[in-house]
Image: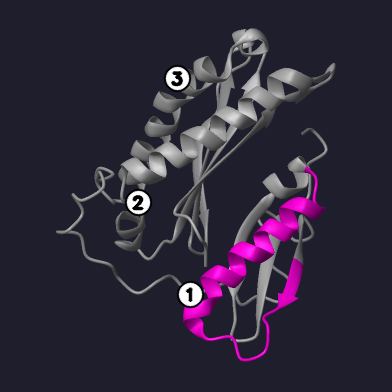
Amino acid sequence: MAIKWLQLVGGSYWGPKGQAFLGAAEARAGIALSSLESELLTEFDGGIWLAQAGYERVSVGLEFRSDKRGRPLRKIADIGRLITPEYSLVWPELENATVDEVRERLRPVVLDALDLVGERRNLGKLPRTGEAKGLTAVPLKPLIEDPTPYVEAPGDSFVIIRDLPANTRPSDVPAVLQKYEEDLQALLSKEAFGNIVEAETSPTAIRWLVQLPRAND
């Protein structure tokens, strides 16, 4: 279960020489992604669009590369109710770009990722707010029930579990999840929070699946 239908996450490519972008550039990119996410959440009605196939959330992962020789990545996967398109963007100019320039550069990339989701998952075109009345939701995909879940191979992930407050009603769960995710964001590093793959609920708890960094990340 998720609060928002769209999440934008991004960070530098890590190569043999270290992180592609540091400090101020990373901070400006984070501000631009947050602003763009809010803009798109207002502009489009993605909740019912995703619910056509039983999904709840799409998390677009953007990797920034400084080396023009790098090959851009463009792939999509899904786990449970979450769809995760991933793009690797070769853009050395990010180092000196303003927040507005970053947002304008990333907007078409994110829209392309959402078009890819619509194409690969047979959802059609993402509707603008107020234009989704003809779409029909189906039952949500089952939550992950495996007690030892993983993303690509056993052992590549771990889970964080937090009990729901006593007597929590189903209608209260979104607000509780939002508060819990704010707590997680305050506790975890930016990189760790960005590695959360999925959140799922049970009648008594919320569980987050977190993918461990790979050796070549």
Instruction: Please tell me whether mark 1 or mark 3 is closer to you in this view.
Output: 3
Circle 1 residue: 142
Rendered view: 198 above or below 95: below
Disc number for residue 104: 3
Q: Marks 2 and 1: CB-CB under 8 Å? A: no
Q: Residue, x 44% and y 61% (percent of image)?
A: 56
Q: CA distance from mark 2 to mark 1?
A: 20 Å
Whole-percent x and y of residue 45? 31, 50
Within 10 Å of the Cα at label 1, are there few (<14), some (14-19), or many (20+) other Cα atoms?
few
Within 10 Å of the Cα at label 2, are there few (<14), some (14-19), or many (20+) other Cα atoms?
many
Position of residue 52 in the picture relative to residue 176 (left or right)? left
Rendered view: 152 above or below 1: above
- On whether residue 59 falls in the magenta region, the answer is no
Q: Residue, x 50% and y 37% (percent of image)?
A: 75
Circle 2 residue: 46
Q: Residue, x 68% and y 83% (percent of image)?
A: 165
Instruction: Please tell me whether mark 2 or mark 1 is closer to you in this view.
Output: 2
